[in-house]
Amino acid sequence: MPTELSIFLSSGFLLRALLAAVLVGFVTANLGVFVVLRKMAFFSDAIAHASLTGIALGLLFGIHPVLGAVVFSVLVAVGIVYIQKRSTMAIDTVIGVFFSAAIALGVLLISLLPGYRADLFGYLFGDILAVSRIDLIVLGCVAAGSIVLVGWSYRAWLAIAFHGDLAQISGVRVQRMEYLFLVTLALVVALGIKLVGTVLIGSLIVIPAAAAKNVAPNVRSLFGLAMLFGVSSGVFGLLAAYALDIAAGPAIVITATAIFGVSFLFKR
Amino acid sequence: MNLLAVHNVSVRYRDRMVVDHVDFTVDRGDVVAIIGPNGSGKTTLLKAILGMVTPSEGAVHWHGNPRIGYVPQRVDLERGFPMTVEELLLLKLTDRPFWRHDRATHHRVSTELARVGADKLIEKRVSELSGGELQRVLIAFALVDRPDVLCLDEPSSGIDMEGEETIYSLIHRLSEQEKLTVLLVSHDLDVVFKYATKVICINRKLMCAGVPSRVLTPEMIQQAYAGTATHYKHGRHSTHAH
């Protein structure tokens, strides 16, 4: 095993994958805290799945697929909030409609793509071992951007998670911060596509934060534990994938789920 | 000059008129109780006053930009919500990340909580507080900004009878000590007679406004609650109207 580990660490593409896993694990878990506190797990999953349609649109019109994913995810998120605020429908119904429609449109658009697209599988389930130096730089920039956004907004998002009206009276511009949250969520979804793909990125946002919430005595430790669990899921999932010769994306999500299982045993 | 003037305010939700041309004023130092039967538009009126709901007609005018503290009727937190009482107050008390707060800030949180007799709750999770404890903490949260006006929506909901009396005594003490103007939505007529200097009784429309002992006659109460009301005594000396 020490020999295998040294081979792992001396391999450029594996090291890049490891760095990507740390970055994505850190950022998704950080934002995941707000997703879990605001009971938006289904919402974030819908945005993640909708990014598939954005990728298909990008491939169809020759735009960078990840940019397509960000733009389409933001549109779906804003659409869900817009319809929900202007109707008497329950939020999960609205999400359900958008979620199904986005998936159907995505599959339809993919069927229109000419020829066989091997890269689509990577967008669906992630292809972390194919992370290039440029990918890593883009990942780093998006991660830094989302960390700045979270750092600037966490106080307002926490106040909204506690009580929206109270936050508004305390001077938080609730609607503006809600939309900023959606944009950040879409950015983080796009960030994770390379790692675990559109199908599993929702789980990487929700599971580490949910595991942390099981055991954290306060919000301070909730952030710390969520980031620890997110990074650990990425690193140990990748190592497990390498050792067992299995797909990295699912291995990372299963590692996160295992951490959640253990945290559930120690639930407060 | 009046601190607050509510000019002919109506609030409509789609086709339904929830508040219908309500008009009254509030002076500095008043303790105003907004009362009325269930579904009479009390909470909506308070939200219109606070700017959380836009009136479909009329206007709300505050004079002199007063600072406003608000205590909502309900905070629906799931049991696992991990925020502690200290972390809640730190959202207002410091601009620094709250994992980096110092001893002085901790002392300030403790002092703020002591004002409402809740300093022992500082390390507790907000989601694990009883109804009465949560109300105290929410009042402390509202008072952090040193407001001129304190608005409370049914401050006794979810609290047992004894806790209810304690919360109203606390509000009364704070209003006198801090020279606060208080607007509170209540269904408890005893509270109105005991603590309020002014009552606004609505049943979508304004039924009466003025000094409780003058305007709240049995006939007026009967009319405001439109025959569906029951005025009953429970406990030793509490009268509620629903």
Image (tube, helix red, strand yellow):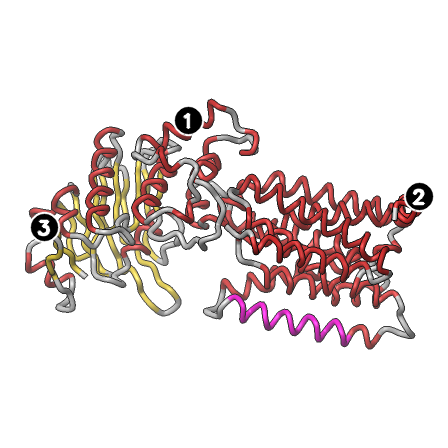
* B85 left or right of B216 in image: right
Q: Quadrant of residue A242?
A: bottom right
Say which residue label 1 marks: B108
At a point 65% along the width and 73% down the height, the residue shown is: A100
Q: Is mark 1 on a helix, strand or loop?
A: helix
Q: Which residue is drawn at 9% across and 58% down?
A: B220
Tell me the amino acid under the disc marked 2: Ser
Residue B211 got which mark? Answer: none
Q: What stretch is highlighted in magenta?
A: A91-108
| Callout 1 crowding tier (Cα within 10 Å): few <14, some 14–19, many ≥20 | some
Secondary element type, mark 2: helix
Where residue A69 sits, quadrant-wise, is bottom right
Dot 3 falls on which chain? B
Is residue A93 highlighted in magenta?
Answer: yes
Badge 2: residue crowd in 10 Å (few <14, some 14–19, many ≥20): few
**For residue A11, side relative to residue A88 (left or right):** right
Disc 1 residue type? Arg
Return the x and y of residue B34 as percentages of the image width and height. 22, 50
CA gap between label 3 and label 2 equals 80 Å
Residue A131, given in percent of the width and then of the height, sits at 87, 52
Callout 3 environment at 10 Å: few (<14), some (14 to 19), or many (20+)? few
Determine the chain carrying the residue at label 1: B
**Residue A110 appears at what percent x and percent y?**
81, 73
Q: Do the residues labelled 3 and 2 touch (CB within 8 Å)?
A: no
Host chain of mark 2: A
* C-alpha separation, residue under disc 2 versus residue under disc 1: 53 Å
Q: Which residue bears the numbered disc 3? A: B237
Using the rendered image, report if marks 3 and 2 lie on a common chain: no
Between the residue at mark 3 and the residue at mark 1, the CA separation in whole angstroms equals 38 Å
Report whether residue A18 is seen. Answer: yes
Going by the numbered disc 3, the residue's amino acid type is: His
Residue located beneath label 2 in the image? A10
